Image (spheres, helix red, strand yellow):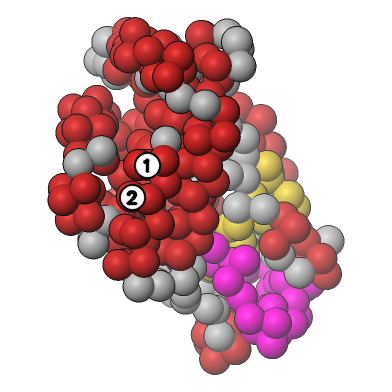
Amino acid sequence: MSFERVIGQDTAVSLLKSALREGKKGLSYLFYGPKGTGKSFTALQFAKSLNCENGTRGCCDGCPSCARAEKLSYPDLHWLDYEAESQTVKIEQVRAIQSAAGLRPFEGRVKVFVVNNCQNLSEEAGNSLLKIVEEPPLDTVIILIAESSRSVLPTIVSRCRKIKFTNTSRGELVRILQDKGADEKLSGYLAYSSSGRIGQAISELQNQPLEERDAILLKIFNPVKSEDMLKDKEEAHKALTVIMQWHRDILMLKLGLPEDYLINRDRLEELRQAARVNSYSSLISVIDTAGMTFEYLKRNLNTRLLSDNIQISLKNG
């Protein structure tokens, strides 16, 4: 039942179901692919399946083991989550994994260790983790999660079964979103603005994304309001995303590219008007400046500098 909840990753699910049928233990896996494609969610379903009390071909989502694992409170599921880019998996944390892996399972058939965002491993921690990834105990399964296999030490990658996650096609994502209640306008916007990242698109369904985008567009050309909007890091991230996507659409129209690929197709006439009055250089300048400002955000640079950079670029555009 659990794998039925994984949407748009048929190949990954098929490989994991095969692994469950094989029944092999003492293995390490690397789940890799773009952010928002369901890697963590799928890892949890796989982890539940490994210790489900009602079988070994998938989890029932009804037994006590599945229920506790869903809440990450199952004693044989060890979940290390490093979401922030500034967080680094340190050597001490890897040594804790090594110590726990040497123990017998408390309740289940196997101990499952999940390291989310393992690209954040320090070099020392990565080399230490390699020792257990190479030969996990027979009652242990290790799942590493990263956005790219290239961001993980090659020696670790070579010892893992690799499970690739991909972005969902726009057409398929539109269908999935409409099945979940989104209308044509909203499903089209989310399918393109998320770049096919199904997890992101589905989560945005709860946030009135079109209304949020329209509010941001009203603010970005107002010097006072746009400055306030860029003071908060989370709000700045949303605003910069809208700015880049809006000006990308204008540039695509100006280049004569198909309208089917526009993110903001529901505001097509405004985009056409903007394409007539903006120059190529001004549009590229806005997109480049917004992209550079994203990098400033990641490095926690002065928000005043962020505001100045983006406002100057928008005025020139």
147 relative to 173, above or below: below
Answer yes or no: is residue 180 visible.
Answer: yes
Does the segment drawn in magenta span residue 236? no
Q: Nearer the viewer, residue 112 or 201?
A: 201
Residue indicated by mark 1: 314
Q: Are marks 1 and 2 in contact (CB under 8 Å)?
A: yes
Residue at point 69%, 87% (across, down): 124
Percent of width and height locating residue 160: 75, 59
Three-letter amino acid code at the position of disc 2: Gln
Q: Nearer the viewer, residue 68 or 275?
A: 275
- Which quarter of the figure is the N terminus placed in? top left
44 relative to 253, above or below: below
Percent of width and height locating residue 154: 81, 66
Three-letter amino acid code at the position of disc 1: Leu
Residue at point 25%, 15% (across, down): 181
Magenta-colored span: 114-141
Secondary element at tag 2: helix
Does the segment drawn in magenta span residue 119? yes
Q: Nearer the viewer, residue 61 or 187?
A: 187
- Which quarter of the figure is the C terminus placed in? top left
Percent of width and height locating residue 121: 61, 75
Alpha carbon separation for disc pair 1 and 2: 5 Å
Residue at point 40%, 29% (across, down): 246
Residue 297 horizontal side relative to residue 259, left or right: left
Percent of width and height locating residue 83: 43, 64
Residue 252 horizontal side relative to residue 215, left or right: right
Residue indicated by mark 2: 311
Indicate the quadrant where residue 280 lies: top right
